[in-house]
Image (cartoon, rainbow, N blue to C red):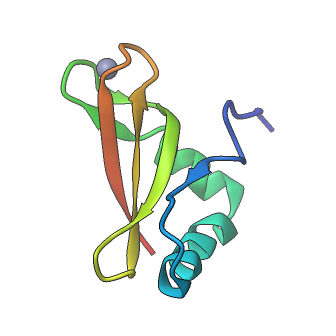
Amino acid sequence: MAKIINFPNPKVSAENSKEAQQVIQKWLNLPEEIKEKLINNVFCSVCGVTTIVDYTVVPNEYYSDVVLKGKCKRCGKEVGRLVEL
Ligand SMILES: [Zn+2]
């Protein structure tokens, strides 16, 4: 199986509430191949579909899903994607 870069230690949002921790834990519990697909399928306005690197996992406002916020691997532009959990 291919090794993934910048895995499995993403920075986690500074937010510390129980709800935030629970939803972030849900992300962390996803199977690695699912997470890999998600981080390799992020839209960059410059490059199109790209890989997100140096990303932070941030809960959405309802603590139902998380948003990955990071940079495009190719051009370094800020990119992000919602992950429905
Ligand atoms: Zn890019």
Residue at the image point whose x is 55% and y is 70% from the top: 24
Q: Position of residue 19 (x, y in %)?
A: 49, 85
In the picture shown, does residue 78 fall above or below 46?
Answer: below
Q: Position of residue 66 (x, y in %)?
A: 41, 66
Residue at the image point whose x is 50% and y is 58% from the top: 13
Q: Is residue 2 left or right of residue 6?
A: right
Q: Is residue 82 left or right of residue 85?
A: left
Q: Is residue 48 left or right of residue 32?
A: left
View quadrant of ligand 1: top left
Residue found at the far top of this picture? 75
Q: Position of residue 42 (x, y in %)?
A: 36, 40
Q: Nearer the viewer, residue 54 or 42?
A: 54
In the picture shown, does residue 69 fall above or below 57?
Answer: above
Residue found at the far right of this picture? 1
Image quadrant occupied by the C terminus: bottom left
Image quadrant occupied by the N terminus: top right
Q: Position of residue 17 (x, y in %)?
A: 51, 81
Hey, which quadrant is residue 72 in on the image? top left
Q: Is residue 20 left or right of residue 69?
A: right
Residue at the image point whose x is 51% and y is 60% from the top: 14
